[in-house]
Image (spheres, rainbow, N blue to C red):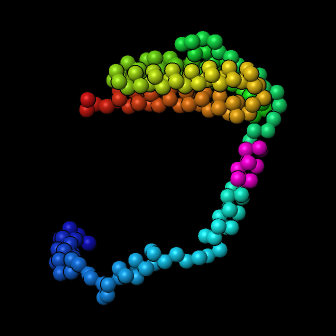
Amino acid sequence: MNDSDETKFDEKLSRLAATLPTQVSPDRDLWPAIEQAINTRTNTIWNTPWAQAAAVVLLVAGSSGITYVAVRDDGPVSPVVIDTANVFETVSGDFGRRYTLGNEYLDAHSELQNKLDEKLQFLSPEAREAVTKNLQTIRAAIKDINQALAAEPDNMLLQELLLSAYHGEISLMRKVDGIANSAMRRNDI
């Protein structure tokens, strides 16, 4: 097909589309049947109080089982306590058999912190303040979790929360790095 054939086809299609009706009414009034279906409650085995109670019991038992598996003791834990008020220091720690924060984490954190310090200048003052406040909140949470871990070194939930907080901090620093990089590449500013 060449351009003139396509143009003729488009014009023919437009003419045919213009002849189509703009509204189509149903053959009969459907609202009474819809209203009756909404207002009529059909009783099945699943919406009886006994079935609902059984579902609640099953949900509670299942979530309790999953919680037990997730927080059972997997071995000794070496808690890390950070005493500094405003300075965040990462330390290598042992979080059971599944996790360790070692030199690789410390190197990555240090590199991201250096990039963060550079890239914050490319953000607006409001964004810079928001990032700083968020990092302070995350770092305060890490400090609090470490203190709680000192009191309860075998608490798997605290260990998971600490790892999640470390992950959140790294993610935020990466996002700032990415945002600042994209802002520097823009040529329409």
Rendered location of residue 188, percent (x, y): 25, 32
Say whether residue 99 is visible.
no
Quadrant of the snapshot with the C terminus: top left
Quarter of the image holding residue 17?
A: bottom left
Residue located farthest toward the right when viewing the structure as drawn: 75
Q: Residue at x 75, y 38 (%)?
A: 71
Rendered location of residue 108, percent (x, y): 59, 23
The magenta stretch is 60-69
On screen, residue 64 above or below 106: below
Residue closer to the observer: 20 or 151: 151
On screen, residue 103 above or below 59: above
Q: Is residue 65 magenta?
A: yes
Residue located farthest toward the front when viewing the structure as drawn: 49
Name the dominant secondary structure of the magenta segment.
helix
Quarter of the image holding residue 45?
A: bottom right
In the image, taking residue 4 as reference, residue 123 lies left or right, namely right
Q: Is residue 20 magenta?
A: no
Rendered location of residue 166, percent (x, y): 60, 27
In the image, taking residue 121 as reference, residue 2 lies left or right, namely left
Q: Residue at x 55, y 77 (%)?
A: 42
Q: Residue at x 45, y 75 (%)?
A: 39
Rendered location of residue 134, percent (x, y): 48, 25
